[in-house]
Amino acid sequence: MKNSFIFILYLTICLSKGYAQQVGHATITIVDPARNNRQIVTEVYYPATTAGNNTPVAPGAFPLITFGHGFVMAWSAYQNFWDMLVLEGYIVAFPTTESGISPNHTEFGKDLKFLISSMQSNGAGAVFTTSSVGATSAIMGHSMGGGSSFLAAENNAQITTLVNFAAANTNPSSITAAQQVLVPTLLFSGVNDCVTPPAQHQDIMYDSTTAAYKTQINITGGGHCYFANSNFSCTFGESTCSPSPSIAREEQQDVTNDLLKLWLGYFLKNDCQDAQAFQDSLVTSTRISYRQNQSIACVTGIEASSLTDTFTVFPNPFSNQVTMELKNEPIFKIEVYNGMMQNAGAYLFPNVNNNETIDFTAFDCGIYFVKVNNTYWEKIVKAGF
């Protein structure tokens, strides 16, 4: 069975990674009925069979990323991200809301959060259906959008990971919201960022978040605006303060992309090689410094049984109920997959407990796989006794 599981994981990774060669684009409007039918105009970029507007989506299911723009910055400034991420096999959605001079950070964070649940449930209008949207997701953002990404991730166990770039403290405070962010979190900072200096923004966010896995990457000589493409609003703001970036925009984006692809490859595609490459890059790269609370060493269902001091499942085999326990972190999400790796259910836990019990009474006897906190895997067996 272990060999079968290895094959299933390998097949899943191979089918979902790297074969889409074209970038499709669509403008959609998603309505949130819980906020007086708020209309969220969104620019979506996705793996397509041919490049262009409203072209057919490529075969397969692709992890979903929502991305928040910076203060008075247009979504079009982030083509460097969508060009890279779509060709890596991700759908990237940019809400265009809160782009004026008096943005509402709370609403922007809710937009980033709502787009994930809406697109996973309903697809993207006439462009593609839910079958094209994968089960894993990330919320990302730059500057104001980076701060708002913390608001979107606060007490949000439906997403898989949080990533941001030169995140700015918002109103309400993203630093305060970080205390309730549990999903794996990656922060990028520019050492020469004079707009949102790391010591006043991202450093405090990193210290504040309770995420079980968190990493802060400081790009040597990096600035605030170089995370995006050249645009007047950001460049003008950065020109009024110091220090200035001491590296080229292309260099800052290259190091960002290199590490971002590895982080997402692991957390959104369960690629263990990317996890190891990410850890190796942190140590060997001469272009960054970093902080990390613990390594993102890959843990799969093949290996989890050897980590009984960290993750335990009991009883196993079981009759109707099975309990999962983590030693060093609370459980906030459990996903159940059948023997063919099809999602059979997801459970969210708002309470801060290290163990949770799932009732399998309604499930047929057989082999299942459970994934806890988007990270830990284990094979379980429901027996007929």
Image (tube, rainbow, N blue to C red):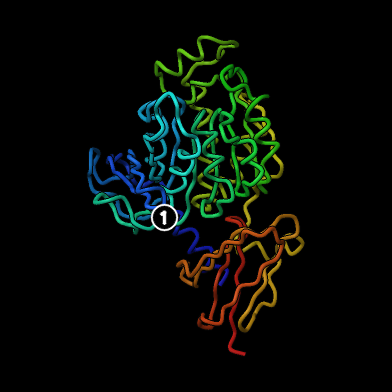
Above or below: residue 350 compared with residue 266 = below
**Residue visible at 56% across and 54% down?**
157
Q: How crowded is mark 1: few (under 14 residues within 10 Å), some or many (20 or more)?
A: some
Image position, residue 357 (x, y; %): 65, 72
The residue nearer to you, when weighing 278 against 342, is 342
- Identified by mark 1, the residue type is Gly
Please identify the quadrant where the N terminus is shown. bottom right
Pointer 1 residue: 134
Q: Which residue lies furthest to the front in this view?
A: 36
Above or below: residue 245 compared with residue 181 = above
Please identify the quadrant where the C terminus is shown. bottom right
Image position, residue 367 (x, y; %): 54, 76
SS under mark 1: strand
How many numbered marks appear? Answer: 1
Q: In which quarter of the image is residue 188?
A: top right
The residue nearer to you, when weighing 208 against 91, is 208
**Residue visible at 45% across and 43% down?**
112
The residue nearer to you, when weighing 294 against 35, is 35
User: In the image, 192: left or right of 71?
Assistant: right
Image position, residue 279 (x, y; %): 64, 40
Image position, residue 218 (x, y; %): 63, 27
**Residue visible at 43% across and 50% down?**
116
Q: Quadrant of residue 380?
A: bottom right
